[in-house]
Image: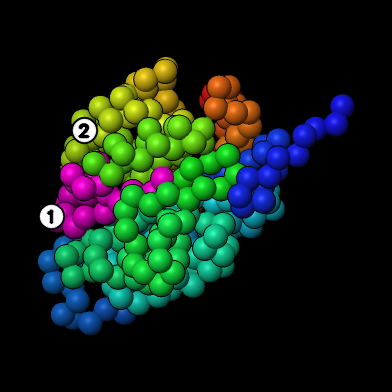
Amino acid sequence: MERDSISAPDGHDAMTPFVLAHLSDPHLGPLPQPRLRDLAGKRAIGYLNWHRKRHMVHRRDVLADLVADMQAQRPDHIAITGDLVNIALPPEFVAARTWLDSIGPPHDVSLVPGNHDAYVHGARNHFPSLWADYLRGDDATPGSAAVFPYVRRRGPLALIGVSTAVPSAPFMATGRLGHDQRNALARLLPQLADEKLFRVLLIHHPPLTSPGRWAARLRDSRELLEMIARHGVELVLHGHDHRHATVWLDGPRGRIPAVGVPSASAATQGHNHPAAYNLFTVSGHAEEWRCDHRVRGFAGHGSASETSIGEIGTVRLI
Ligand SMILES: [Fe+2]
């Protein structure tokens, strides 16, 4: 039987499943050499942490292998949920922009920032300008700085990007959406539902705080969960916990999957979940979406040369 071919505004055939890849928390190294005055306060702790432990956890060779595997899957779009840098030194943002450009053009890659991207007060202005091409909604003026939430329509998807990236005290990694973003979301979500789009919320912090993660929680989690319960989204993608996670949130028409992913650069040694990424295949229409979730990445432990990337699991979410 011949299929009708209906093209979305971006040229995607509406009958063809849309594949969205999701990776997070690359924590790009190596750290640039800081000036002494850059290491005041929280950055000094982060700098020591990087050199004591984190540089062995977050490895560029692991990240490169993971990205190569992801690109071989030829996803239609790539979502990255934050923490590109570590202690938010200005040269880290420049290096991260080069890395972003290697992932794909801004049209095909949507980014939201994480708490490490706003590690200290003085650093929070870097990402909205340097990474703006990857953070800009379809309606934004070309050349403008990032404004959240943003909306990008790609195939059957509405990608809604929010920022929870705010500076926090030493030993804290909290995030916050704030009133303005929450109010804008409350207007956008019903509007995008009326457009019959598959709404994907991109957020760095998990909407529901994981056990033992109080110091790293989303501070207005309760308000966000209430809004999701009222207006719904089809899928929530997050990073931050550096672990595989699928949590089901209450929605107006049933349960909503919130899916986390390990750090894209996490070495296979140690107790972290090794590097992985998500692939979501979305098909159907607003009355009957179907979303299949595949996970690919490193499994088990061992040196990078002993462990290869493969399919970790696959499940139908919707
Ligand atoms: Fe992170």
Q: Which of 247 and 300 is in front in this view?
A: 247
Q: Does the magenta stretch include residue 32?
A: no
Q: Which of 101 and 129 is in front in this view?
A: 129
Give coordinates of residue 207: x percent, y percent: 30, 35
Q: Nearer the viewer, residue 18 or 100?
A: 18
Give coordinates of residue 201: x percent, y percent: 41, 40
Give neighbour class at mark 2: few <14, some 14-19, many 20+ (Cα, 10 Å).
some
What is the magenta segment's predominant secondary structure?
loop
Amino acid at the residue labelled 1:
Ala
Say whether disc 2 or disc 1 marks the residue closer to the N-terminus: 1
Q: SS class of the residue under badge 1?
A: loop
Q: Quadrant of residue 216?
A: top left
Give coordinates of residue 210: x percent, y percent: 29, 32
Q: Residue at x 32, y 58 (%)?
A: 147
Q: Is residue 181 magenta?
A: yes
Q: Residue at x 38, y 28 (%)?
A: 232
* Residue 153 versus residue 190 in the image, above or below: below
Q: In which quarter of the image is the C terminus?
A: top right
Q: Quadrant of residue 71?
A: bottom right
- Left or right, 101 with reference to 220: right
Report which residue position mark 1 lands on. Answer: 169
* Residue 71 versus residue 277 in the image, above or below: below
Give the extent of the magenta segment.
Answer: 160-182
| Residue 223 image label | 2
* Residue 138 versus residue 209 in the image, above or below: below
